[in-house]
Structure formats: structure tokens, C-alpha cells
Image: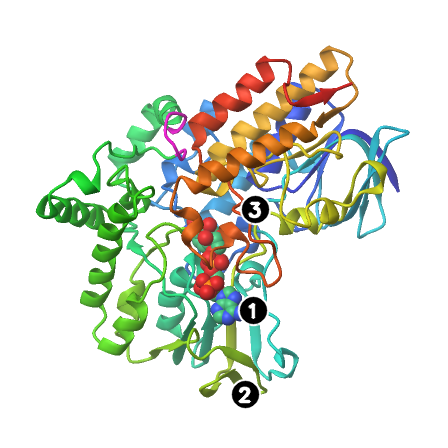
């Protein structure tokens, strides 16, 4: 079937749903969304692994464009769990009556720009062709699962799963020997829950990781009321902070604070729990000396929690600055290693060689398991875009244009790819920000841009190559002012995927500065873009 539309949105998670709403209900475009899953939810549709929970606190992890939606929904816990977020997104989709305009179980396999017709031709796996003027990718930053290419995986006699493609029916670990590879945010959330059910859990750790207690808990009635009464103010606060959270980064510097006082501050932050640990001092991510104080504090905490000295040493032998990789928060992660049925295996010194029929093979020998859980992350940020097989002007494929790393303007537009917008694309704050805040800003900007084009009879918008050059330079410069690029194994850098170019992908200048830049670009007639 060939379907002609004004616009097509790819993806029906937080981003795609809101973009569909804006384009359909505000701009009155003829627009649809396509979604590979059988339901809405994006990340939260696919990541159903045990312990899956958001690290943003619930009162900032939702749509804020509608006060009505904010007042009608009530979160039950400090951090929303996967099932509750999925319920929320279904609630929002139903309130906005979005589902009727989403084609589910529809995976895009290619998108080609037809310059003569000034249209994108988007092909789906099912054989449909969407012919559209505007193409908006809302495919998320972490939606292309990375299953390491371990030789012999196909011979494994047990079951294996990637956390980002978790079976809807769940996995029963009762009585099973489980091997879990990966100790990022996902593995750190999953390990304690799997350990409670499994006969034995063996965690294969390549890079030791920091983690701070989340201190999740049911929300008291008073807090729920506070959120309802202060919805507008909470929204406003998330627009004023560097990372779209409701907490502010303290003005004080770790390097200027006396050691005793600093310890008290870290201790209080540890007790309070959550991502605001990294907001304890303003110089934590810019000064190695400051960062060392936080790193040292967390490492000492790990060693004080984990009873076996060898395991404690492995867990606290962390090779990067605190928060230079996305910092996880946890519920009893380090405590889990005190259980009799949990073992930690170091696969940095003795890497995984492959998978046998019976289990995981390292240079140290075979670890027999019944189930393997790959908590091995994603081909982040560029992976989901590249999977769409996008071909722009003059037959140039995105995979060739981005061979040396992503190159775009504002993280939103790509030279040579007219009328294509990438929500939370590389080069935008995205994963360094509370995602719904980053998403709403992008979707609003895109809607205003399309509105401007229609009002002025403009047919195409395309980033100028020189604007791309400048933007990439700025993204690099901002990242290099921080300690972020110093984590060698970080997915922020693409370093988790063999052969992927090492380029720091997210915009590290903070959401406030980024929003101002985007607004001023629009106010100056979409400076840096060619509008025709
Ligand atoms: P990740 O941070 O990329 O962690 C993947 C883990 O797998 C790392 O420990 C990595 O080791 C290991 N690994 C990968 N390939 C390996 C191999 N061949 N051999 C041995 N180990 C291997 O992925 P993730 O934990 O899924 O998290 C990704 C992102 O998703 C997070 O950073 C976060 O932004 C988001 N997330 C958010 C939440 C939340 O909000 N609650 C929860 C989960 C995830 P190396 O470090 O050595 O590469």
C-alpha cells in the first residue's frame, strides 16, 4: 500500500507520541506514526527486564505540556517502575486519542529522499510505502540492542535474553543457574532481583561501575498532593536546570570544601539517594581533583558494603571518573554480592572467549549456566537511526555521511537530508538530560519549525554544511571541558560497539544553553538552515 501524508513519525514512545499529538492536533497535519512494537511505550515497551525502573524521579518523568495530564496521573513510587511507566504512556495515548493514528508492528526498513518530488519514501517491513513531506525520527537513543558477537552463542543449550528485548511473559529464574553479562545501569538494576529468584547468579563484569542507592519508596500522600498542587512550578524548575531534573547543582566546589565537611555532604547525598548525588558540587564533572573526592567516597562505600574482600576489590576497581559514564543508581546492588548464591567474575583480565553448549567460556574456563542475560547495552544514539537505512539527497546514505561519527546541526537536522528531523539525536542534550524534558523541547521546536514553513510557503529545510561543522566543533569543545570523554569504555563515545567511531555524541552544554541556542536559531529565521 502507498500512503501519502504530510508527515510521518517513526516510533511511539515518549517522543513519537508527543510529536504525533502536536502535528495532528495543533498543526492539523495529515500525520501518522509507525511503531515496531505491538503497543506504545518505546524504551518502556521493550525493556521489561527484572528491576527495570527509571532513574529520574517520577514527578519529573512525564509529559508536562498539559497540566490536565499532570493532574490526572498519580505516580505511586519515588522512581517509576517499567510497568507503571507503560501504564502511564498508555493512559496518555488514550487521553490524546493517539492510537488510532499509530500503525503498530510496523518496522521501517528504509527511507529514501526523492528530490524531484520533494518527498521521503519510507518503506516498512510489511511492504507499505509512506510518501511524506516531513519525516521525524522518534526512535530513541537506546533502542538498538547490543548482543556481543560471542562465538558459539548458537550452540548454547539454555535460553538467553537481551534486557532490551525482554519477553513479555517474563522469565522464570526459579532453580536456574543464571549468567549475567554487563554491569551498566541495567545489570545493576537486574542483578538483585534475579539473585532473589535464581539458584545461582554469576555476574560477568568487564568494567567496574559506580552506583549510588536510589532509595526508592512508595510516595506519601502529602507528596502526591504537593505534586498536583505544584505541577506548574515543577515544570518550570525542570526548564531551569542543566539536566532537566528538579534538583539544582550546588554552587559550592568540592576542591574548596574542607575534607570533613565534604564527607558530610557526600554522606547526606548517599542517604538521600538518587542521581542528585552528582549535584553535590559544581566542579564534580569538570575537575579531576573534585571528581576524585566523589569517586573515593563511593569506592569506600562499596568496600564497606561488600564483605568478601576480593569481590569488594573487583567492584571498586573503577577506571573512570565518577559520572563520566552514565551513573547508575540501585536498590541493594552491592549488597547482592553478600548473598551465598551470587558470584562475581572479572572478565576484564580474563575476557569472555565465547559461549559453549553449557555456558560462558572465559580465559579462565567454563562457567556452566542455564540462562544467559545480556545486560550489554545498546548501539546508542546512532544505532537506531542507522537501522532505518536512510538515504538522502543525491543517493547519499546516512551510514556513509556518518562513517566517521554523527554530523548534524543542533542534533536535529542533517546536511543532505532535507525535511528530516531527529528527536534527541546525537549532538543534542538527550541522554545527559531527563529525557521527557529534552523530548518536549525538540518536538515543540520541530512543530514550530514546520508551522513556520507552512505559514511562509516553504517546501524544504536543510542544515547548511558550515552550520554542521560549527555545531560539531561546539559539541566537542563542550564535552572536552568536562571529564565525560575520559571514560574510555563509555557508550557516550560509541566505545562499547566494536568498530564504531569514537566520538562523544551528546551535547554537554546543558539543557538551558541548548534551549536558548535552538530558540535563537528559530528567532533568526532558522539561521544555519537553508529554507527553500
Ligand atoms: P551499558 O551502560 O552500555 O552497560 C553494558 C554493560 O555490558 C557494561 O558493563 C559493559 O562493559 C558490558 N559489556 C558489553 N559488551 C561486553 C562484552 N563483550 N563482554 C563483557 N561485558 C560487556 O548498558 P545498559 O546498562 O543497558 O545501560 C545503557 C543506558 O540505558 C544507561 O546508561 C542509561 O542511560 C539507560 N538506562 C537507564 C535506566 C534507568 O533510568 N533506570 C536503566 C537502565 C538503562 P564495559 O563497560 O566494559 O563496556
Few, some or many C-alpha atoms within 10 Å of disc 1 (few <14, some 14-19, many ≥20)?
some
| Measured Cα–Cα span from mark 1 to mark 3 | 20 Å
Quick one: label 3 or label 2, which is nearer the N terminus? 3
Q: Is 239 inside the magenta-drawn segment?
A: yes
Quick one: label 2 or label 1, which is nearer the N terminus? 1
Q: Disc number at residue 161?
A: 1
Q: Residue at x 56, y 31 (%)?
A: 95
Asked whether 344 or 123 is in front, the reply is 344
Asked whether 458 or 439 is in front, the reply is 458
What are the residue bounds of the magenta stretch?
238-244
Q: Quadrant of the N terminus?
A: top right
- Relative to 469, residue 398 above or below: below
Few, some or many C-alpha atoms within 10 Å of disc 3 (few <14, some 14-19, many ≥20)?
many
Check contact, mark 1 vs mark 3: CB within 8 A. no
- Relative to 322, residue 523 above or below: above
Q: Residue at x 59, y 30 (%)?
A: 470
Quick one: label 1 or label 3, which is nearer the N terminus? 3
Q: Disc number at residue 358?
A: 2
Asked whether 350 or 226 is in front, the reply is 350
Note whether ligand 1 is within 8 Å of mark 3.
Answer: yes
> Element at badge 1?
strand
Q: How many marks?
A: 3
| Measured Cα–Cα span from mark 2 to mark 1 | 16 Å
Per the image, the residue denoted by label 3 is: 141
Check contact, mark 3 vs mark 2: CB within 8 A. no
> What secondary structure do most residues of the magenta stretch adopt?
loop
Asked whether 95 or 382 is in front, the reply is 382
| Measured Cα–Cα span from mark 3 to mark 2 | 34 Å
Amino acid at each position: 500500500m502507498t500512503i501519502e501524508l504530510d508527515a510521518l513519525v517513526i516510533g511511539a514512545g515518549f517522543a513519537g507520541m508527543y510529536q504525533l499529538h502536536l502535528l495532528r492536533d495543533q498543526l492539523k497535519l495529515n500525520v501518522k506514526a509507525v511503531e515496531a512494537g505491538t503497543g506504545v511505550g518505546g524504551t518502556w515497551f521493550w525493556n521489561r527486564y527484572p528491576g527495570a525502573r527509571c532513574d529520574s524521579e517520577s514527578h519529573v518523568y512525564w509529559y508536562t505540556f498539559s497540566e490536565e495530564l499532570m493532574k490526572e496521573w498519580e505516580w505511586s513510587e519515588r522512581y517509576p517502575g517499567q510497568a507503571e511507566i507503560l501504564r502511564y504512556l498508555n493512559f496518555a495515548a488514550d487521553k490524546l486519542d493517539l492510537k488510532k493514528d499509530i500503525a503498530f508492528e510496523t518496522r521501517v526498513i528504509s527511507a529514501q529522499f526523492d528530490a524531484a518530488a520533494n518527498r521521503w519514501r519510507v518503506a516498512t517491513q510489511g511492504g507499505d510505502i509512506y510518501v511524506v513531506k516531513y519525516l521525524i525520527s522518534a526512535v530513541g537513543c537506546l533502542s538498538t540492542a547490543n548482543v556481543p558477537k560471542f562465538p558459539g552463542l548458537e550452540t548454547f543449550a539454555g535460553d538467553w535474553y537481551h534486557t532490551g528485548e525482554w519477553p513479555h511473559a517474563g522469565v522464570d529464574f526459579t532453580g536456574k543457574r543464571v549468567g549475567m553479562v554487563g554491569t551498566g545501569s541495567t545489570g545493576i538494576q537486574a542483578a538483585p532481583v534475579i539473585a532473589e529468584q535464581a539458584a545461582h547468579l554469576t555476574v560477568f563484569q568487564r568494567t567496574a561501575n559506580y552506583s549510588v542507592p536510589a532509595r526508592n519508596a512508595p510516595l506519601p500522600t502529602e507528596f502526591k498532593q504537593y505534586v498536583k498542587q505544584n505541577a506548574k512550578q515543577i515544570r518550570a524548575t525542570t526548564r531551569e536546570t542543566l539536566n532537566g531534573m528538579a534538583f539544582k547543582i550546588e554552587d559550592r566546589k568540592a576542591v574548596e570544601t574542607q575534607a570533613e565537611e565534604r564527607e558530610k555532604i557526600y554522606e547526606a547525598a548517599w542517604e538521600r539517594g538518587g542521581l542528585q548525588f552528582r549535584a553535590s558540587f559544581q566542579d564534580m564533572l569538570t575537575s579531576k581533583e573534585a571528581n576524585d573526592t566523589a569517586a573515593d567516597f563511593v569506592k569506600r562505600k562499596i568496600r564497606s558494603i561488600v564483605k568478601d574482600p576480593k569481590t569488594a576489590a573487583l567492584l571498586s576497581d573503577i577506571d573512570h571518573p565518577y559520572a563520566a559514564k552514565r551513573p547508575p543508581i540501585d536498590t541493594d546492588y552491592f549488597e547482592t554480592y553478600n548473598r551465598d548464591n551470587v558470584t562475581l567474575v572479572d572478565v576484564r583480565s580474563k575476557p569472555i572467549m565465547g559461549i559453549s553448549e553449557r555456558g560462558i567460556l572465559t580465559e579462565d574456563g567454563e562457567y556452566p549456566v542455564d540462562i544467559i542475560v545480556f545486560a550489554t547495552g545498546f548501539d546508542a544514539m546512532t544505532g537506531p537511526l542507522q537501522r532505518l537505512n536512510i538515504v538522502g539527497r543525491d543517493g547519499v546514505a546516512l551510514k556513509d555521511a556518518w562513517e566517521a561519527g554523527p554530523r548534524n546541526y543542533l542534533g536535529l537536522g542533517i546536511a543532505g537530508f532535507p525535511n528530516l528531523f531527529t528527536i534527541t539525536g546525537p549532538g543534542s542534550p538527550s541522554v545527559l538530560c531527563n529525557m521527557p524534558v529534552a523530548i518536549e523541547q525538540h518536538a515543540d521546536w520541530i512543530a514550530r519549525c514546520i508551522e513556520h514553513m507552512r505559514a511562509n510557503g516553504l517546501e524544504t529545510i536543510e542544515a547548511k554544511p558550515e552550520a554542521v561543522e560549527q555545531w560539531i566543533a561546539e559539541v566537542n569543545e563542550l564535552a572536552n571541558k568536562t571529564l565525560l570523554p575520559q571514560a574510555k569504555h563509555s557508550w557516550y563515545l560509541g566505545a562499547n560497539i566494536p568498530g564504531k567511531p569514537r566520538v562523544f555524541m551528546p551535547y554537554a552544554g546543558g539543557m538551558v544553553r541548548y534551549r536558548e541556542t535552538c530558540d535563537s536559531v528559530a528567532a533568526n529565521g532558522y539561521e544555519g538552515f537553508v529554507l527553500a
